[in-house]
Image (cartoon, rainbow, N blue to C red):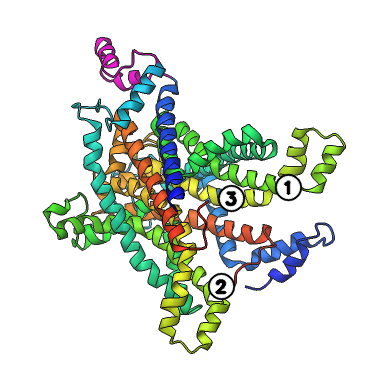
Amino acid sequence: MAGTEALAVAADDDDALPSRRGLRLRYFLRDKKAVAGLVILSALTLAAILAPLVAPYDPNGMDFAMIGAPSLDHWLGTDDLGRDLFSRLIYGARISLFVGVSTVGVALIIGVALGIAAGYYGGWLDTVIMRYIDLQWAFPNFIIAVYLVAVFGTGLSNVIVAISLAFVDDFARIARGMVLTIREEQYIAAARTIGASDLRIMARHILPNAMAPIIVQATVSVSYAILAEAGLSFLGLGVESATPTWGLILADARSFISRAWWLGVFPGLFIMLTVLSINFLGDALRDILDVREVKEAH
Amino acid sequence: MKGYLIRRTIGAIIVMWAVATLVFFMLRMVPGDPFLAMMRDVGDPAMVAQMRRDFGFDQPTYVQYFKYLAQIAKGNLGTSIYGSRVEVARIVGEAFPRTISLALLSFFLALVIAVPAGLISALRKHSVLDHTVTLFAFLGLSMPDFWLAILLIIAFAAGLHWLPAVGYAPLSRGFWPWFSHLILPSIAIGTPFAAIIARMIRSSMLEVLKTDFMRVADSKGLPARRLIVVHAFPNALIPVVTVMGIAFALLMAGTVVVENVFAIKGLGRVLILGILNRDYPVVQGAILVVSAIFVFSNLLVDVAYTMIDPRIRYD
C-alpha cells in the first residue's frame, strides 16, 4: 500500500504541515477495510440508539409465528417464543456496544493511572503495581473476567466490573512503557525546573504524549470486550435472561439449531461483523497514529 | 540453563501461590458472606451454621488461610457443597484429562493447518492462495469460538449427522469414539489459534527470505526445497514460538468456553457450573487447576524458546 512516505515526513513536525489532519483523513479513506468498518459500526451504533424506531417489532413481543424461517415479515426469522430475531439483535446491540465501550473506558482510566504512577514514581510503588499487573498478564483477559464473575457473581453490573478489571493490565503496561521513555525527555526536565507539580507533569506533559498507542489499544480492546461480554452471556454468567444480548440469544438458540439454523447463524454474524469492523478500524488507527512505523506492504 | 530452569520454576510456583492467595481473599472480600449467599436456597440457619463449622468458616481468616494453603499443598481441594459432597480433587481429576485431550488435539490440528498455510502464503505472496489464507485468518480471529462451535454443530451434527453433537468418550473406549467427540470442539478451539500462527509464520518467513544468509544459500545454487526446509523455516519459527505462549493461552480460554457448548465435562464446564451453582469450593479448585495449566504452559513455552534459539542467554 502506498501513501506512507508522505506521512513519514510529516511525522516529526506537528505544526509545520497544516494539512496533517487532512493527510491522515486521506490515508484513512484510502483504507477500504477501515472505511467499511466505520460504515458498519456507525450503522450499528445508530440502529442501537434508535432501536425503538429501527426495530420492526417489540424485542420481547411474542407472536404465534414460532421458529419461523427468515421471511418478508420477519427478516431474520423468529425464535421459539415467536419473537422477532432482527428486533432482538438490534436491541442486543445496545448492550454489546454499551458494555464494550464502558468497560474499556473504565479499564483505560484505571490502567493508565496505574501505569503512569508506576512508571513516573518507580520504586516500591512500581514494584507493587507491576507485580499485580504481571500476574494478571499471565492469563487471558477472558479468563480473568470469568474468575472475577466467580467472585462478584453474575448480572450485568458485575459483568461490567469484571470485564473492566480484566482489561486493566493491557493499559497499565502500555502507559508505563510510554512513561519510561517520555520521563527522560528534556521537556519533562524543563517542566520540573519551572516548578510544575508531579500531577501536572503527568497530566499535562506525559499523558498527551502517551496517548497514541493507548488509543489504538482501546480500539482493539473494545472488540475483545464485546467478545468477552458475549462469551459470558453465552455461558449464562452475564445479564438476566429477559434482556436480549447477542451471547444470550445465541445460548438460547442452542436447543433449536437442528430445526432453526437462523437462530444459530445471525447472532454470531452480528458479533463477528462488529468485532471485524472494530479490528479494521484499529488497524487503520495503528497505521495513522504510529506514523514512524511504516506499514509492511502486503 | 539449569539455573534458568530453577529460577523460572520458582517463579511459576510464586505465581500459583499468588493466585491461590488472591482467590482465597477475594472470595472472602465480596460484600456479603458467600456462604450465606450459597445457602440462601436452603433457608435453614442451623444447617448453615453446621456447614460453616464443617468448612472451618468459624475460625479467624488467617487460620483458614494457612490451613487452606496446607491443604492445597497436599492436593486436597475440599468438597463440593452442591448436591452430594464429592471431593473437589476427584471432580477436577476427572475433568482434567478431558480438557487436556481437547487442548492438545486442538493444538495439533491447528498446527497441521497453520504451518502449511503460513508457508504457502509466504512463498506465494499475493497469490490467490495467499489472499485466501489471509481472509480465513482474519475471519478466524474475529469469529467467537462459541459461535463457530454452533455453526459446526449445525453443519456436521444436526445437518449431515456425521458426528455426535455433544458429549465425550474416553480414549479407553477406542480411538474413533474419542476422536469423533473431540473433532468439532477442537476445530472451534483451534481456529483462532491457527489464524494467529499462520499469520505469524507468514510474516516471519517473509522476514527470513529477505536476509543475507538466504541470498547466500540461494546463490550457492541450493535446491528450493533445501533452502526452505533447512535454512528458512527453522529460523522463521523463532518468533513464532514467542507468540506461542499467548496463542496457547487463548487456546486454553477457548477450551473453557467450547466445553460448555459441547457439554464436555472438562475443567471449563466444571468451573462454569460451579459459578452457576455457587459451589465455591469447586470454583476455587477449578480456578487453581486452570491457572496451573496456564502457568505451566507458559513455562514450557519459555523453556522451548531458549532451547530453539541458541542466541538467548539464560541470565
Identify the mark at residue A217; answer none if there is no mark.
3
* Spatial separation of the CA atoms under disc 3 and disc 2: 22 Å
Is residue A292 something one can see in this rendering?
yes
Label 1 resides on the chain identified as A
Label 2 resides on the chain identified as A
Identify the amino acid type marked 3: Gln
Q: Look at 41% across and 38% down and name the residue there.
A: B13
Please say whether residue A74 is one of the residues in the magenta stretch.
no
Identify the amino acid type marked 1: Ile
Tell me which segment is drawn in magenta: B32-60
The mark that comes first in sequence, 1 or 3, is: 1
| Secondary structure category for the residue under label 3 | helix
Q: Which residue was labeled with disc 2?
A: A298
From the top left corner, tell me how far across and down residue B117 is, in percent: 40, 71
Please say whether residue B56 is one of the residues in the magenta stretch.
yes
The mark that comes first in sequence, 1 or 2, is: 1
Left or right relative to A284: residue A12: right
* Spatial separation of the CA atoms under disc 1 and disc 2: 32 Å
